[in-house]
Image (tube, rainbow, N blue to C red):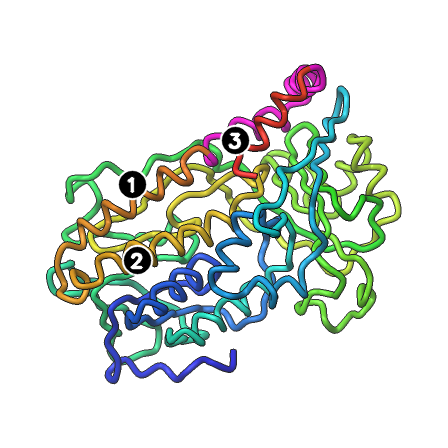
Amino acid sequence: MSDSVPLNPNANSYDVAVIGGGPAGAAAAAFMARTGLRVCVLEQKRFPRQKVCGEFIPPAGWRVLADLDLAPRLGRAAGPDLQYVAVYPQWGPELCAALPAAAGGLAARAISRDVLDSILLQRAAELGAVIFQPVHVNHVRGPTQTGFEVFPVGSPSPLRARAVVLAHGSPRLGAMNAVSGGNAESAGRPPAPRCGSGDLVCFKIHLENVRLPDNTIAIGGVEGLYAGLLRTGNSAPAADAGDDTCKNRACYNLALVVDRKLVRRYGSGVELYGYLRRHNAGFGRSLRTARFTGEFLSCGPMEPGVREVYADGRFFVGNAAGEVHALIGEGLTLALGAGQLLGRVMSEHRAALAAGKDLAIIGAAYRRGWLNEFGSRLHAGNAFSQVLMKPLLSAAATAYLHAFPDIFDLCIRWSGK
């Protein structure tokens, strides 16, 4: 990225160090830098790069991007307005419902992650954040009383910051997440709960020549697998720029969430794609003439649920704080919204942050806001996904919702759309 600077820890100390430059970290850095805080971002990958993601952004997410003056810039690369959601169960009737009307002229749209992440991080730099990229962080050390030391790989000395934002996307980086003096129990807090969904693996592929209306999202499943399909734009993703087969054509994102037992049985994203096409009539129709424009990407395990929001001067955003099931398509909105929320909370307590005190008060305010804004979406995602990935339940549920469409509309709104 052109705005990156050489890593020179001895020359720099910051109010906040953000570890991870994806949507959550970049948004948090941008909003905090805009208030005048001294912010740095440490991102381990060189952008642009692709990520496993459904790439759906509802109006709430676009409002956050508009707050950063990015809606017009990103809108030129995004797909068309999404107005409907179609549900394709393995058995039972298919459903279609309208998404809530666009608010303030901002409709739900999808955009490729390579474009979104690059422009977001660039915006953080424009607002004053210092970007270190690519830089891998080993661990974070330090109590809130004296500030934190951030240890990048290959650096002779650490960066220093009054507070740390963890946007690395993983609940498993123990050395980075650990609070001072030991583990969470020794600091008087219970460990973050596990949701029991660690047997789910995610896949993603970009496609062209898909038979799906431009304004519609398709979701549905078969035994052990959930799928989401939507249009993301007209140009080939940057990661696939060497192959221009999708240039100036409609491009689509197919995201799969798969039980690990099914992954072991079929072995690859291509085979799982065939399984979906054979056993789900709606997706079979939509994908009959589809062609891949790249290779399947995969990641996992997926663990939906709330993890940690604040701990001992460490503020968590994005998947590091909590993961919503891919069925709901709210992951990017959660990431962007958490960054906006953290920026607002930090701005309101800027004097306390600069003085190196009352971080627990800031953390409590952030945790309350985070749970109020995102808690219901996490629970909704878990509940709906369990239905769609089980054909008998899915058939019964879709038949019920077909008979009572107002309840289906309520479910859409409850999930954050």
* Horizontal arrangement in the rendering, residue 399 relative to residue 210 (left or right): left
Which quarter of the rendering shows the C terminus? top right
Of residue 268 and residue 95, the one placed in the foreground of this image is 95
Identity of the amino acid at label 3?
A: Trp
Q: Which residue is drawn at the image coordinates 65% and 34% (left, top)?
A: 225
Q: Residues within 10 Å of mark 1 (few under 14, many from 20)?
A: few
Which badge, 3 or 2, comes first in the chain's sequence? 2
Q: Earlier in the sequence, mark 1 or mark 3?
A: 1
Residue for point 66% across, 68% down: 239
Q: Is residue 176 left or right of residue 334?
A: left
Q: Looking at the picture, how far across and down is residue 228, in whole percent? A: 67, 41
Taking the spot 48% from the left edge, 69% from the top edge, the residue there is: 121
Cβ–Cβ under 8 Å for marks 2 and 1:
no
Counting labels gives 3
Instruction: Please tell me whether mark 3 sits on a helix, a strand or a loop.
Output: helix
Q: Mainly helix, strand or loop, the magenta region?
A: helix
Using a 10 Å C-alpha cutoff, classify the residue at mark 3 as few (fewer than 14 neighbours), some (14 to 19) or many (20 or more).
few
Q: Amino acid at mark 1?
A: Arg
Position of 65 relative to 193 (above/below):
below
Helix, strand or loop at mark 1? helix
Name the residue tied to disc 1: 368
Q: Which residues are magenta?
A: 377-403
Task: Give the quadrant of residue 327.
Answer: top right
Dot 2: element? helix
Type of amino acid under label 2: Met
Residue at mark 2: 176
Residue at point 51% right, 59% down?
65
Q: Nearer the viewer, residue 234 or 67?
A: 67
Q: Indicate which label's residue lies in the foreground, 3 or 2.
A: 3
In the rendered view, would you say 367 is above or below 118?
Answer: above
User: Who is closer to the viewer here, 88 or 267?
Assistant: 88
**Which residue position holds label 3?**
414
